[in-house]
């Protein structure tokens, strides 16, 4: 029998939670969004958004205006609860990249008092294998009057599942609807209930599996991407040493019918690809050798880029008698972890700019068209946010870090004779790989 969901609660109104809440609400389902951030709650309740995502502002505005979406700081009763909170790192037995479950634990305990028999709880947060079972254990501890799948199986009062998101920033609304969804219930009835929920808006296929397989599936998808990016990044370093244009090389190699090398960059960022592989490494440190190596290659790329920038600045000083490094200006283009979004989580561009501010004697400018102020990681650093045209005009060294559309439109003639470090291959005739 298909389960009906009159009210859905989304715990965590960030880059995944808010779009998910908006899409459910656009289907005329009552949605209660919960977030500890008062600014986010107030912004959403005005029908506005606190993140950048194409078309999300219109969907949220309509949902709030029509009364299908509202935000609050405290959980309220609902028929289904979707937890979409961060899972960052902390120091642990395997080192500094141990998964931090504190946000999931806090979210679980916050919804426990309002749970009732028949409710569905879904963990959407990307998590280490076993996280869904741990969440269910926390819920059971908080609500001994209810039964859960780990002890009562199909007869449990509460259904529990893991259903990871797999969307691309900048295309979240479309991909939430169109992409296939992996549904990992703790029991078949848990999976059935979760699939019924997502079919409210998902046009792709809802594929049923176990909770552990669903957890590992998300980690595997992002580790696959990370390994492939690491190959491209390592190739760019080798090509630089051998005086080969890596962009041309990749273009030629990709003409092979079974080769599809990705594009190198300044590193890997974001809340998924830069994080998820470490979850696998943390749980199988003796066996995840390739996955660990790929992470190390990608994590080390910002340091390599920084060295190229410092070398470029030194070359400028050597070519201009009478000036010092302190007289130079380095302008960095981009701070987000990928093009055409405002998300700076785990961004290698931020790491590079911060290192420059601390290690370069001259002026450091940064242009980021998707931000009105510097991210908190750069507060207090010797960095000034300026428009792109000013950044280029004032620069002695131009550093392309993020290939935003606005930057890609800058003609090479505007760079002129300035030293150039192009980590994205935007100006391929003069790039430093």
Image (spheres, rainbow, N blue to C red):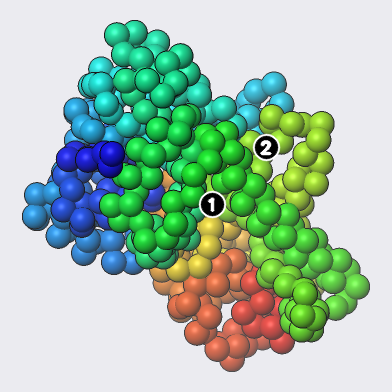
Give the numbered dot on residue 160: none
Q: Which residue is mark 1?
A: 270
Residue 350: tell me if it is visible.
no
Residue at the limit of the structure toward the front, as seen here: 1
Could you say whether the residue bearing mark 2 is in a helix, strand or loop?
helix
Label pair 1/2, CB-CB below 8 angstroms = no
Q: How many numbered tags mark residues here?
A: 2
Q: Say left or right for 385 vs 263.
A: left
Residue at the limit of the structure toward the bottom, as seen here: 413
Q: How much space separates mark 1 and mark 2, taking CA atoms?
A: 17 Å
Residue at 64%, 72% (x, y): give it. Answer: 424
Residue 416 sits in quarter: bottom right
Residue 385 sits in quarter: bottom left
Pinpoint residue 64: horizontal percent, then vertical percent.
Answer: 13, 52
> Label 1 crowding class (10 Å Cα cut-off): few <14, some 14-19, many 20+?
some
**Along the line of sight, which residue is nearer the eye, 294 or 24?**
24
Q: Which residue is mark 2?
A: 280
**Along the line of sight, which residue is nearer the eye, 210 or 28?**
210
Could you say whether the residue bearing mark 1 is in a helix, strand or loop?
loop
Pinpoint residue 328: horizontal percent, then vertical percent.
Answer: 63, 68
């Amino acid at each position: 029998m298909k389960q009906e969901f009159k009210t859905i609660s989304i715990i965590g109104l960030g880059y995944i939670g808010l779009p998910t809440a908006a899409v459910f609400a656009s289907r005329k389902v009552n949605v209660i969004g919960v977030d500890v951030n008062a600014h986010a709650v107030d912004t959403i309740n005005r029908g506005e958004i606190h993140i950048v995502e194409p078309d999300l502002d219109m969907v949220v505005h309509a949902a709030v205006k029509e009364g299908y979406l509202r935000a609050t700081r405290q959980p309220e009763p609902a028929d289904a609860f979707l937890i979409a909170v961060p899972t960052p790192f902390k120091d642990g037995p395997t080192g500094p990249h141990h998964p931090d479950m504190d946000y999931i634990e806090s979210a679980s305990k916050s919804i426990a008092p309002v749970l009732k028999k028949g409710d569905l709880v879904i963990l959407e947060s990307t998590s280490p294998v076993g996280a869904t079972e741990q969440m269910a254990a926390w819920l059971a501890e908080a609500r001994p009057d209810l039964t859960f799948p780990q002890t009562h199986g199909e007869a449990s009062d509460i259904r529990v599942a893991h259903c990871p998101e797999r969307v691309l920033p900048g295309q979240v609304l479309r991909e939430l609807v169109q992409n296939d969804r992996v549904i990992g219930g703790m029991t078949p009835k848990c999976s059935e209930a979760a699939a019924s929920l997502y079919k409210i808006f998902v046009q792709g296929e809802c594929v049923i599996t176990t909770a552990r397989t669903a957890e590992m599936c998300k980690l595997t998808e992002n580790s696959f991407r990370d390994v492939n990016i690491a190959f491209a990044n390592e190739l760019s370093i080798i090509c630089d040493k051998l005086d080969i244009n890596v962009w041309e090389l990749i273009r030629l190699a990709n003409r092979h019918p079974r080769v599809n090398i990705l594009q190198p960059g300044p590193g890997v960022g974001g809340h998924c690809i830069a994080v998820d592989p470490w979850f696998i490494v943390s749980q199988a440190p003796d066996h995840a050798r390739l996955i660990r190596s790929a992470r190390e290659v990608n994590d080390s790329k910002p340091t390599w880029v920084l060295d190229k920038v410092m070398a470029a600045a030194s070359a400028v000083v050597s070519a201009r008698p009478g000036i010092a490094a302190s007289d130079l200006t380095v302008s960095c283009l981009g701070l987000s972890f990928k093009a055409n979004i405002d998300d700076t989580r785990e961004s290698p561009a931020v790491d590079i700019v911060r290192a420059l501010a601390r290690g370069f004697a001259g002026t450091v400018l940064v242009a980021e068209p998707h931000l009105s102020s510097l991210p908190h990681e750069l507060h207090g650093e010797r960095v000034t946010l300026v428009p792109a045209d000013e950044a280029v005009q004032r620069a002695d060294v131009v550093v392309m870090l993020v290939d935003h559309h606005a930057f890609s439109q800058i003609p090479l003639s505007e760079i002129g004779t300035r030293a150039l470090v192009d980590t994205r291959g935007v100006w391929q005739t003069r790039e430093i790989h």
